[in-house]
Amino acid sequence: MKGKENSKENNIESKNNQMEPGGANRRNANSDRNNRMRRKPRPFKVERAANNNKVELTVPVETPEPDAKPAVKIIPLGGLGQIGMNITAFEYQDSIIVVDCGLAFPEDEMLGIDLVIPDITYLKDNIQKVKGFVITHGHEDHIGSLPYVIKDINVPIYATKLTLGIIENKLKEHNLLKSTKRKVIKYGQSINLGCFRIEFIRTNHSIADAAALAIYSPAGIIVHTGDFKVDYTPVFGETIDLQKFGELGKKGVLALMCDSTNVMRPGYTMSERTVGKTFDNIFAENLKHRIIVATFASNVDRVQQIINSAVKFNRKVVIEGRSMVNIISTATELGYISVPDNVLIDIEQMKNYTDEQLVLITTGSQGEAMAALSRMAASIHRKISITPGDTVIFSSTPIPGNEKNVSKIINELSMKGAKVIFQDTHVSGHACQEEIKLIYALTKPKFAVPVHGEFRHLKCHAELAQDMGVKKDNVVLLTSGDVLSLSEDRAKIVDHIPSQGILVDGLGVGDVGNIVLRDRQHLSENGLIIVVVTLEKFSNQVLSGPDIVSRGFVYVRESENLMEEARTVVNDALDKCLNKNMTDWGKIKNEIKDSLSDYLWKKMKRNPMILPIIMEV
């Protein structure tokens, strides 16, 4: 890479000398200084040549020697300080690559919001530089935003086989499959995108075909682990390629961007195979009962183990939940799940079998309102009802923020007589402290940039990196939107760009912002009062009203006295305006709103949203 840089600098220098007016005369006049420059390193010489161009137009001044070592920009557009919405841009000169493109689920105060996707304004502003999306694995927090983003940034997508299969399902739903270029990448294979070369490295995770990335840039090698753990006995495929991490460490790793999700947990993450043994035990203990297992749709290895246990105990398997059906179909077609013949049956065939012959694999392990298990618990599922004696297994742990929803579902299932099991039925797909330390020991990075986690995770990761020999000044804690300039000598935050999430509500993307959310929150907390008044067109005399309509504030039939007093307050406010010959409707509305708001606060200590409507006849 350095050889290419030097040749490029030579070309730049020769062009500058050819194009610069009076360049030869100036070189002769300053021959002593030029001779001194020739003895200095080439990068310094090019910088001085560039400075000479400026000196010609301004007053000649002595300038300090700039740092000419190449610097790559790392720009996390999401995923830091939060769980989900992982997306990071890497930029060098005219090349940008984007690693992952995930979504986040809405927080409690985001009323009515379905999804949160990253703000890609920076990518749109630099669209001519963007060379492609490089995806580490197929979870929603790493691929979920692609159908929304690819409409504006239509560049190729590079991913492993199963990951790309899941992405293609999403693109198909949004009618983007034909217009989007895609390429399957194998472990150990490299792709060249602009100034970058990216190599895919085999890792283990809770979904098959997960990969880490070795990003070869002009500044040095950057290793991005993606989501990973070290599983020596994976259900599908081989164990993580630790040898490759070691080889990269010998070459010299400039920076390690490592998963922080489980950094606060000591020790090692259990192997996925241990869950299979737990399933066998649960199946053996519940031979006479129907078994329902809720897990993440994308956890292909977990689904495989449920099917294995079902086969051992001669049970038929029903798959329920749209995302579960889609992913299992894709994984089966691509050979990532092995299902014996006549094991999977359609939901319509359940009536042909007794409870002890059935296993249901369903979505809803996070308490999602419209997921299959939630609808079963609420008795609104069209084809499946929970009955006393059912055994329901939660094969997951609640994502932070979902604990209340999961508890609610467990309570509803228990009230219907179901036996709920959630202990020892899940292992994490993320590395604990000792596994993270192993990656640091193998790669020996100069800089550490913790990723994937809330601030408390990143801070704990920073301390672990220092324990593993990374200098304190070389550990960089970023927030989403920071622009990190990374070179061989230093890592420095040089800028910050917009990175607030874009809210998706139904088919609307970005049309709901903070003001709309604030109004929704106000309505949810205090309700709405609408005041309707009809005025005569020329005289502004009140022809009808004021009529008051309440929604979510009080039950009108039980609060007639309050409504009558409120009507009187509005009448007084109108009379006050008309007596002053006030004709500005905006001022009249404000007077009505202020008067009624003051009255309701004094009367009830409530502050509903008040919406005055004036009609003219």
Image (cartoon, grey):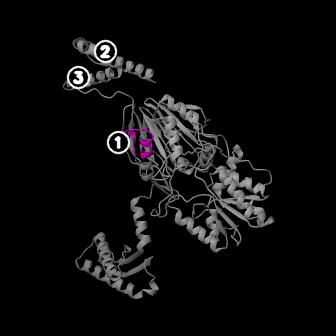
Q: What mark, if any, has residue 265 been given in the picture?
A: none
Q: Please, is residue 151 above or below residue 558 in the view?
A: above
* Percent x, y of residue 91: 43, 36
User: 298 left or right of 55?
Assistant: right
Residue lying at 75% horizontally and 50% vertically, measured from the top left: 339
* Percent x, y of residue 384: 70, 67
One can see residue 124 in this view: no
Dot in front, 1 or 3 = 1
**Magenta range:** 462-478
* Percent x, y of residue 196: 49, 31
User: 383 left or right of 485?
Assistant: right
Mark-to-mark CA distance, 3 and 2: 20 Å
Give the image quarter of residue 180: top right
Reading the image, the residue beneath label 2 is 38
Mark 3–mark 2 contact, CB under 8 Å?
A: no
Q: Amino acid at mark 2?
A: Arg
Mark-to-mark CA distance, 1 and 3: 30 Å
Mark-to-mark CA distance, 2 and 1: 34 Å
Reading the image, the residue beneath label 3 is 56
Reading the image, the residue beneath label 1 is 495
Q: Amino acid at mark 3?
A: Glu
Q: Quadrant of the C terminus?
A: bottom left
Q: Please, is residue 341 above or below residue 25 in the view?
A: below
Mark 2–mark 1 contact, CB under 8 Å?
A: no
Q: Please, is residue 81 above or below residue 91 in the view?
A: below
Q: Secondary structure at mark 2?
A: helix
